[in-house]
Image (tube, rainbow, N blue to C red):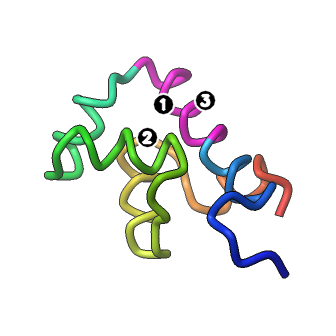
Amino acid sequence: MDKSIYSAEHLRLCAVLRELRHEADLTQVQVAAALGVPQSFVSKYESGDRRLDLIELHHVAKALGTTVQTILERVGL
């Protein structure tokens, strides 16, 4: 198992989160406001500079109008 934050699965997760945000027609600022975090938080997880823990992923999923299960399915996990 690759522990790098730059693993193929992690990079795919970042791409899926960006895609879902675009599909929801939301900006990073809007998602950040829904999460109660700075816009840089969203930018960092979308660019792969930051990993999300499971609880954070759940909150991001809700802000995007989806579920963790849907995110994982789109990542291919």
Q: Position of residue 57 (x, y in %)?
A: 47, 63
Do the residues bearing badges 1 and 2 touch, measured as CB atoms within 8 Å? yes
- Residue 19 tag number: 3
> For the residue marked with disc 1, what is the amino acid?
Arg
Q: Is residue 23 magenta?
A: yes
Would you name the residue on which mark 1 appears?
A: 21
Closer-to-camera residue (2/75): 2
- Residue 62 tag number: none
What range of the chain is rendered magenta? Answer: 15-25
Alpha carbon separation for disc pair 2 and 3: 10 Å
* Residue sitting at x 48%, y 30%: 21
Would you name the residue on which mark 2 appears?
A: 64
Q: Position of residue 19 (x, y in %)?
A: 61, 29
Mark 2 vs mark 3: in front: 3
* Residue sitting at x 45%, y 65%: 58
Left or right: 38 as drawn, with respect to 10: left
Mark 1 vs mark 2: in front: 1
> For the residue marked with disc 2, what is the amino acid?
Leu
